[in-house]
Image: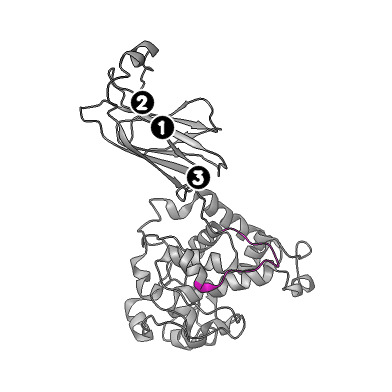
Amino acid sequence: MLLAVTMASTAILPLAEPHAQEVDALSSRPGPVEQVRLTRGDRSLSVTWRSAPTPVRNYRVQISVSGGQWTRAATTTRTSAKLAGLRPVRTRVRVRVWDGSRFGRWSTPVAITPADPAFRDRRFRIRAPGATLVGGRACASRVRPAREIRPANTRFNQTRGTSRNDAIRRVNGNFVGTTDEVLQWAACKWGAPENIVRAQAANESWWDQRAAGDLTTEKASCHRSLRKRTPCPQSIGLFQILYRVHPAAYEDRNAILSSAYNADYLWGLWRSCFEGEMTWLNAVERGRRYEAGDRWGCVGVMNTGRWYTKPSKAYIKRIKAHLEERTWKQPAFVGAAAAGVDALATTDIDELGIRAAGALR
C-alpha cells in the first residue's frame, strides 16, 4: 500500500528510530502521547493527538494495515497529520504516534475498521441504469455537513422550488443547505457521482448561483425577468440552465431563485440520458452510437446536446480536469470569485425577489 503524506506547513525532519534496548528500558514510563484519534476523509486518514506534557521536538506517526508491519507515515512538529493517498481499504488500519524524544515511547495503537462510521466512505456514488433512486427527503438526511464557501449563494441556497417540474416530474428543488450540501443532495437524488457534480458546477459557474452566461441582445432568448439587462443572460445558476432550450426549468423562476432546483433539474436530465431515454441522440450528429450507462457521454450531452462529437469530448475533458485537480478544494477556488464569470448584481437579485424557504407541499 503506497502512502503519500500531505501536511501544510509541516516540517519533515530526519529522526532516528529509538533503539530496541532503549524502548525496553523505558517501557515502564508512561507514554506522553495520548488521546490519539482517527478520522477517515476523502482518500485520506486524519490523525490527531494530545501534545506531550514536556517540550517535544517532533512526533512520528506509523501505520499498520491488516496486521502487517508498522511503516513510517509521517514526521511532524504538530499534533496532527493527514495521511493521503489512501484507497477505500476494506480492512483494519492501526496508527500509533511516538513523541520523538530519547525518553519517549509509542502510544497505544488506535485502530479503525470498515465498521467504524469514521472509516466509511460515505460519498454518493453512481447508481446503475434501472436502479432504484433515493428520494429527495431521504437524501436530505444523508447529506454530510459542509461549510459555505460561497456566502453570496445563501439567499438562493435557502430557497426551495415552488412546484414539481412539468418536464421531469421528480424535479422539485425541495432542499436547503450550503452550496456543497446542495450538490451532494442532487448527486444522491439522481444516483450521480458527487465529485463529478462538484466538478461540473466548478466549470459552469465556479459554484456561484448568481452566474449569468450566454449573454445576448436577443431578449426573447432570455427569461422575461432577466430582460432588463443588456445584453441579457440566456443561462443562469450553478449549472447554467439554458432558458431557450429548457423553459420548463424557469417556471416560477425556479432555476434562477433556487440553487437546489437548478442542480435538481440538470442532474435529472443527466439521469434521463444515463438511463438510455434520449434515443433521439442516435438520429442527430454523433461521434458514436448512444447507449445507456455512459456517465461521461451524458456529461457531454448536458453541454452540447450531442453524443461524443468533438465539442462534447472537449467539454468532457474540461470536467475531467476539474475532477482530477479537485478544483473545489484549491485555495484559488475557496472563497474567491471566478474570473470571467458574469454575475447578477445585488439590484438584479432584489428586483427578482427571493422567496423565503418553505417546504414543498
Q: Which mark, by number, is residue 46? A: none
Q: CA distance from mark 1 to mark 3?
A: 21 Å
| Residue type marked 3 | Arg
Determine the residue positioned at 49% across, 51% down. Answer: 326
The secondary structure type at the circle numbered 2 is loop
Q: Are marks 2 and 1 in contact (CB under 8 Å)?
A: yes
User: Which amino acid type corresponds to the residue marked 2 in the rendered image?
Assistant: Trp
First in residue order: circle 2 vs circle 3: 3
Write the start and end of the magenta stretch as one range.
125-137
Q: Nearer the viewer, mark 1 or mark 3?
A: 1
Image vertical order of residue 211 relative to residue 124, above or below: below
Q: Where's residue 209, x and y in %?
A: 43, 71
Q: Is residue 21 above or below residue 65?
A: above
Residue beneath label 2, please? Answer: 106
Could you tell me if the residues under marks 1 and 3 are in contact, i.e. CB atoms within 8 Å? no
- Residue at position x 52%, y 80% from top? 172
The three-letter amino acid code for the residue at tag 1 is: Pro
Q: Which mark is residue 43?
A: 3
**Disc 2 or disc 3, which is closer to the eye?**
2
Q: Residue furthest top?
A: 21
Q: Which residue is mark 1?
A: 109
Residue closest to the far front: 28
Q: Is residue 313 visible?
A: yes
Q: Nearer the viewer, residue 226 or 183?
A: 183
Q: Is residue 214 visible?
A: no
Front residue of 76/257: it is 76
